[in-house]
Image: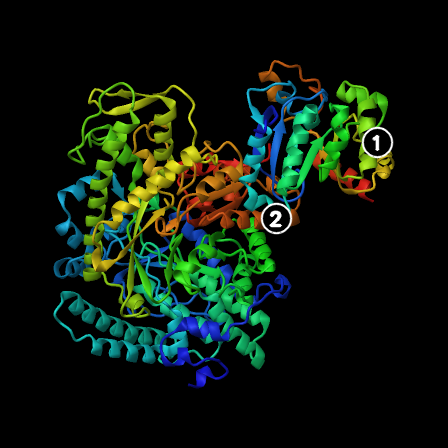
Amino acid sequence: MNKFKSGYIHSIETMGLVDGPGIRVVVFMQGCPLRCLFCHNPETWNKQSDMKMTSKEIVDEVRKYRPYIEMGGGVTFSGGEPLFQSEFLLEMLQMCRKAGIHTCIDTSGTGYSKEYLDEILKYTDLVILDIKAIEEESYKNMTGKEMDEFNYFVDKLLKNNNKLWLRQVIVPNINDTKEYILKLKKYIKKFKKVEKIELLPYHTMGKEKYEKLNLKYRLLETPDMDKEECKKLQELLNK
Amino acid sequence: MNEWVGFKGTKWQKNIDVQNFIESNYKEYLEDDKFLTGISSKTYKVWNKCKKLLAKEAISGVLDVETFIMSGIDNFEPGYIDRKNEVIVGLQTDEPLKRIVNPYGGYRMVKKSLEAYGYHLDKELEQNFKEFRKTHNDGVFDAYTDEIKKARHNHLITGLPDAYGRGRIIGDYRRLALYGADYLIDQKKQDLHSLTDISDASIIQLREDVKEQIKALELIKKMCLRYGFDVSRPASNAKEAIQWTYFAYLAAVKQNNGAATSIGRNTTFFDIYIERDIEKGILTEEQAQELIDQFVIKLRLVRHLRTPEYNELFAGDPTWVTESIGGMLDNEKSLVTKTSYRILNSLNNIGESAEPNLTVLWSKKLPENFKKFASKMSIKTHTLQFENDDLMSPIYGNDYAISCCVSALKLGHQTQFFGARINFVKVLLYALNGGRDEITGDLVIDGIDELQGEYLDIDEVLKQFDKVLKKTVKIYVDALNIIHYMHDKYAYESSQMAFLNTNLEYLMAFGLAGISIVTDSFSAMQYGHVRVKRDERGLTNAFDIEFDFPRYGNNDDKVDAVAKNLVKRVYRELKKLPLYKNAVPTLSLLTITSNVVYGKHTGATPDGRKSGVPFSPGANPTQGADKNGALASLSSVAKIPYKDCCQDGVSNTFSIIPSALGSDEESRIDNLVKILDGYFNSGAHHLNVNVLDKELLIDAMNNPNKYPNLTIRVSGYAVNFNKLTQEQKEEVISRTFHEQV
């Protein structure tokens, strides 16, 4: 009998329409190595949750939605950080590939186990890469971690030549400037197969969750990012 | 005939066969919406006048009532909105929005509704009517059994059409346009002539009915002459085809006040005439759109006089002028024409509105362009509903239409006997309470054992549940048999039946309210360990559930199978009993807005719902119970069997916030198309779609003046949000709005 790997899941959202193309089942995986200032899902930080599932259970769940996801949609592994459970993730990606389900990972490019990374990228049809910052110091301020791991991931990504969506959260007083956008524009030139670049306006809807979890919210003074301003920056980036 | 020059096919020329006429002549349209035009100056003027009248009506609820004349096909002087700018004419009475008194269904209802709005019927007319005329309502109550009365009184069976017009009949109004009244009269005379076997009362009844239909057709000719049109002959161009069809419908709503009086499936039929005129060079695209816009305006003005209690059940003054659009001809070709686009384009030209109830018959094979356009209009106006053509056409053929909200019938060949619904939750509660009503304490169903013990034992409950169900179904069937016998006798809809075959197939439309609650309650009993609390009368009034249990709406087979088995069980019971006119039973999961009133009259339930809390609408999962996202919720509903079970329709209302549907308009349209494709490919029947922010509705609830035209889809129809009661508004807002995590 085949023994399937199991892992920790935060939740499964059956109808994701913005995390990848088409209609997608989004598997929110538990655990994240980063502690981003703007994070609105702090409940996914811990490595463990009370929802442990096997890869087969999850892929079976995804399969149930075939009539919806087979028309240009698929599955998106998000989180938390899906790479944080690399071996488990890889098994699910392989099973999806075998079943003909389009796969996407929504990742910060950190938290992986190196030995699985090549295989993971091989079995991923689309990577949604969340760029936290593009310079060492601001990266560390934003995420609490050094940038090496992210840089290594980017190198692998360039070698594997995966299809990419890039995302960057725009936070007032941190990166909401034209200068930053122009730098970002330059930085992302190295990615060749980018299908979409999205600037996401920071919002404060995650605040309450921190209170519930007894965690300190570190951007108390920061307002929501103005959506119109963010749009302007997006235009600048697209130009 | 001259009027038919240029049309192909012969079968339809020999016998009444509109379907064959359409098949032989229509032109499928595969391109996009770019050909559409805006509002004409005439339409603009007419609609402007209407808008003023509608605003006035919104303040008082009723603009005017005709109190000197009663309902009838040719009882009213012609009426106009703006005569020189109206290209399609005809109103129910001599003034727009002036309502008709129709006492044949029941006099008390008329009196109550007149009083509610401060009107009085002409004294002499009232006296004469009451003295000389027995009504449908009188007849029904003469024949009702004590069991039926008790079940009604305790809200076990509600909304029965025993005091108002039953509706649900769709005359094939196109017949007047294609054949003209004289031909139809000839055909009916031939039918009458052949009904010679008088050995059976049903033949006598049918002979009388057919004669009534002939009289109705004669009256229709007279009514139309008042407007200056001779409908004894067929329509000779597009304008006449639309006008004739509308006249035939108009006769129906002058004579009857049926709860739902749907108009059928007309766009492809009209398109044939429009195309012929455009080819001849006698009609432009602007004029074609103008005809459709003005036809739609007329349908928006249909009114009936109702009591405030009626509005509680069916909020917002609905008339269910349902028009079915699209669908497939066969496996390859769709019935989509340019006029399918034009009628949806009316929503651009004259704004969103609850009526007509625009229903898109969806097939996976519909032209992609049309799918996108329909989705675009749905997102923009929240006034469309979608029903699965791939599920219905194998049963009803390619010329069926939706009556009321979700109920298909073969045009011209079938009609429905409307039967409202049972409060299914009470069936369960009676099983827990020895057949007594949990609110009134009345013994409604006898022979039910009292349950013992602190905890609910599912097997014991099921045993009693089955007994209650059997007896309830019997009472329900008895009631509907009586109602439709009496309706035929005292309030026969001759003007509608005149446009149907003489030998009809009848569908008796039964319904259930509260499927999600009963399902979740059984799941709670199975997995949750439910402890009962009883009041001093020994009746259940609260339940403690000790463990979490799976709920309907999460795509969990454990509980979804319960829902499936429950409806099958009900249908099995229905099939056992003989029905009036040998009707075939059908079943719906549909509540309209009555889910609020049902909840109000229903005690606490084992799923944890408190006494008085609204049911979820139709087949929707209980508000907030669907926790695994929209696809899980849709998938649960899709498991309810349609074919050979819930063929009267399985209504699902789906609300999603715009930002979750996609990041821009184009992706929202694409995604909605995919959702509909996926939902219907998995065998589901019906979907109302609202793409709205919850905050918008809350704002509209607090500031109604800011949103005079805000229309939303509720169970099976669209309604102007402001016309809902406060409780109904709150219920709509409490529904699950799917959003992105």
Q: Is residue B709 visible?
A: no
Could you tell me the amino acid type at mark 1?
A: Asp
Instruction: Identify the colour scheme used.
Output: rainbow
Which disc, if any, is residue A155? 1
Instruction: Name the element at disc 1.
Output: helix
Relative image position of residue A228 (x, y in whole percent): 72, 38
Secondary element at tag 2:
loop
At horizontal 53% and vertical 68% (from top left) the residue drawn is: B290
Q: Is residue B488 above or below residue B181?
A: above
> Looking at the image, is B582 positioned above or below residue B4?
above
Residue B390 on image: x %, y % = 47, 56
Front residue of B115/B177: it is B177
The quarter holding residue A35 reads top right
Q: Position of residue B243 (x, y in %)?
A: 43, 72
| Rendering quarter of residue B465 | top left
Which residue reaches farthest front? A1
Give the residue at mark 2.
A71
Label 1 with label 2: CB-CB less than 8 Å:
no
**Residue B692 falls in which quadrant of the image?**
top right
Horizontal side of residue B330 vs B247, given as left or right: right
* Relative depth, front residue between B464 and A217: B464
- Please identify the residue farthest to the bottom as the structure is shown: B2
Instruction: Residue at 66%, 21% (x, y): give it.
Output: A31
First of labels 1, 2 by sequence position: 2
